[in-house]
Amino acid sequence: MPQPQAFHSTLVRTLLGLMLCCMAMLAACKRQDPENQSGDMVLTASATEVYAGLATPVKLTVSGQLPSDTISWSLAGPGSLSATTGSSVQYTPPASIPNEDSAMISASRNGGSPAQVTIKLHPAAPLALLAGNLGGAGNLDSKLATAARFYGPSAVVLDSAGNSYMADTANHTIRKISPTGEVSTLAGAAGKPGSVDGSGATARFYEPQGLALDSSGNLYVADSGNHTIRMVSATGVVSTVAGLAGSAGAVDGSGAEARFFRPTGLVVDGAANLYVSDSANHALRLINSGGLVRTLAGQAGARGSNDGFGTAARFDTPQGLALGKDGNLYVADANHLVRKITPAGQVDTLAGTAGAPGNADGTGTAARFYDPRGLSADANGNIYVADTFNATIRKINPAGVVSTLAGAAGQSGSADGLTNGARFHLPLGLANDAAGNVYVADSGNNTLRRITPQGLVDTVAGTAGVRGSIDAVGAAAQFNGQHGLASDAAGNVYVADTANSTIRKISSTGVVTTLAGTAGVNGSADGMAGEARFYASQSVAIDGSGNLYVADTANSTVRKISPNGQVSTFAGVAGQSGHVDGVGDEARFYLPQGVTTDPAGNVYISDTLLDKNTPRYSAVIRKITPVGRVTTMAGSGVLGGADGLGATASFNEPRGLASDEAGNIYVADSANATIRRITPAGIVSTLAGSAGNSGSRNGIGALAQFNNPTGLTVGADGFIYVADTGNHLIRKVGLDGTVTTVAGDQLQLQRGISLGSLPGGLDSPVDIRHLGGNRFAVSSGNAILTLTLP
């Protein structure tokens, strides 16, 4: 009988042998099936059903792979992939397809069996991109982060679950971005400033700026415009922690007894003490866990840059805050400094020199900043600086050495890329995650950016609005400004590219060319195509002979472009404004804004002088005959909303014009928030809306509401279609005055372009033009869209 010790040794050897054998067999299995090296690989897509021509790509991501794995992608079907390797790619649908189709995308690991997803393709989206850029400001929520829109975000914080929170300042909201990229509005209502405690969309903020997150999941908000500190609990309930809404001041005390003046930066420590940069008071405040507010450093109303202890120190509009690994509080100071406050209250200058803006890297006071506004700290003791007016992100190591992490000083932009190849525009808030990434609230670009430890900058949420003047196809083209529209029988769209002072042409396939003028060169010269000059032209119209008429706003003239490209001045004299009827250059205009033509070849102009603070103001509709004779058809120098005949009627900032087959002229009376009709006999009536009563309500006649309607057109059905700019909607007005909404978010009035099925989303549409049948062109943001109605 074996001894217990020998038996134990034998058993151990046997079990060890079995274990090694199993491990060898498992390794062999793994070698035979690469797909299962780290378990099942999962392929996910942000959408599995899209329209051709959709400008927002579908994001595809794999998970379950090892870092050493090689992921290969392939596509079977129409469209294109952004890459053929990597853990994530984007699929762009084709510009058009004749029938229903599909695309199969495969991802394989190390050459093994692929994971696949099929994306169903529909021929044409009811709301699609014709040309231009879809990015820019807005408030659109979305399941795809880059499809969401923000408006001047100024702060970002991260939680341990991978969620990001942003103070969406100009929207007066707090936004949340999930780890999967879904963007939602956590609290507040876009475009509705106020100070209301409550849950979710019932709460109100006024220009929230700073954010801080405590260990219990409570989110603190520096509600700058309200002069208060708010809290969003982990369950989403908003309450006021300190200060009194609308009451600026510099009072220490408990809760509502305390007063702040434009607080901006926030940070919270492990003991639940909340530090506040009380910007307009030029002081640092502290709110302890019991809600008692005291002044930590600086003195209210005393601006300066002195170092010192506590209230003996001076600051200039302190903003961003960070708590370092060393326990010190770091402050972004408008003196072009980064300051340090020790736990004992001693204030010192860490980097920069007071009153000396610049962009130099270096140690301590040898470094230069230009109005730094955001700070964050990592676990290694580094401090990161949003060097706002340098458009860069800087880094201060524990030794006080300042370097430039990303961006190029003085070169604003939105480009992603590596270190100094990336561009930012007014970066503000910063945050760090455990993986070493730095997140940037890129305020001027209305986006959330990320800088990896390797220095690669990408856009996490939102899409920057790109303005410019590039002739190209579809999304590669760029425009800049207002964008009044016209269209011809061949399906070409003509664009008044206002800020570029040019007239552009878009073919039915999305090819953009510059028809007349030179981008960025203002003037009034007549001539052929590129020789001609315009100045902030706002609208265009076309007649039956193919002549284009241009409301050349800042020149106070009406221009004509013949089919061969010859530009001439049809009426008025450049630089000579006024209200004079007459023939050709005898006439004078103030600021011609809208233009349309009728079947008889007459041209109509909405002529507005917007300065109501002087005796010189005008809001009239002018008529120009084919021989150039200018008369005043309706309105006078009196602003108002009166109906009547000719000069007895009044308007208030009339803009867009349209005509029907019967010779009626329709007017988007913008500041009155109404749609007006002028008969051939000159009788003015209000078709829909009520003067001075703006809103978004559908209804009949005066019961309906608009908000700054700017452009309009007559459809094949004889109805009036209105670009309701302030509501981000397209409205339809029946001949009986019944108003309905055909595109855009009627319920929440969200701002941001969302292509695909209706109602979709729009960004401040300024004009709409009928293309034939049930198709329209819409100018929205810096893009020209096509709208196909049922």
Image: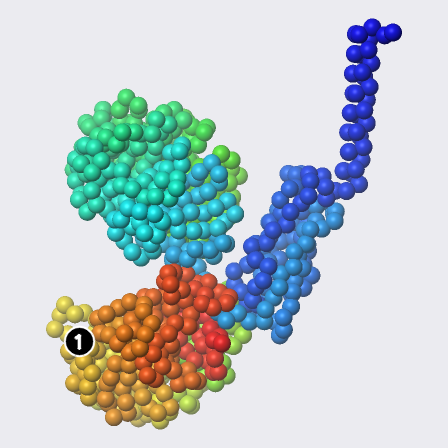
In this rendering, would 117 be left or right of 201?
right
Q: Residue at x 68, y 38 (%)?
A: 38
Query: Residue 547 sits in which quadrant?
Result: bottom left
Q: Is residue 735 visible?
A: yes
Q: Quarter of the image containing the N terminus? A: top right
Task: Give 589 or 199, whichever is nearer the viewer.
Answer: 199
Q: In this orientation, which residue lies closer to the viewer: 464 or 143?
A: 143
Q: Is residue 407 above or below residue 767?
A: above
User: Residue 232: x, y in percent?
Assistant: 34, 42
Image-based side of 496 in relation to 644, left or right: right
Q: Is residue 571 above or below residue 766?
A: below
| Mark 1 element type | loop
Task: Estimate the x, y position of residue 264 in percent, counting from the top left.
Answer: 29, 41
User: Residue at 36% of width from left, 54% of height from top?
Assistant: 151
Q: Residue furthest left?
A: 615
Residue depicted at 28% across the width and 78% down the height: 701
Q: Residues within 10 Å of mark 1 (few under 14, many from 20)?
A: some
Rendering quarter of residue 274? top left
Residue 195 lies, in percent from the top left, at: 25, 49
Mark 1: which amino acid? Answer: Leu
**Above or below — where is 243 with respect to 188?**
above
Would residue 357 be visible to someone looking at this image? Answer: no
Rendered residue at 39%/39% (across/down)? 234
Image x and y of residue 263, in percent: 26, 41
Q: How many marks?
A: 1
Front-most of residues 198 and 557: 198
Query: Residue at the right extreme?
Result: 1
List the residue tagged with mark 1: 639
Q: How is the image coloured?
A: rainbow
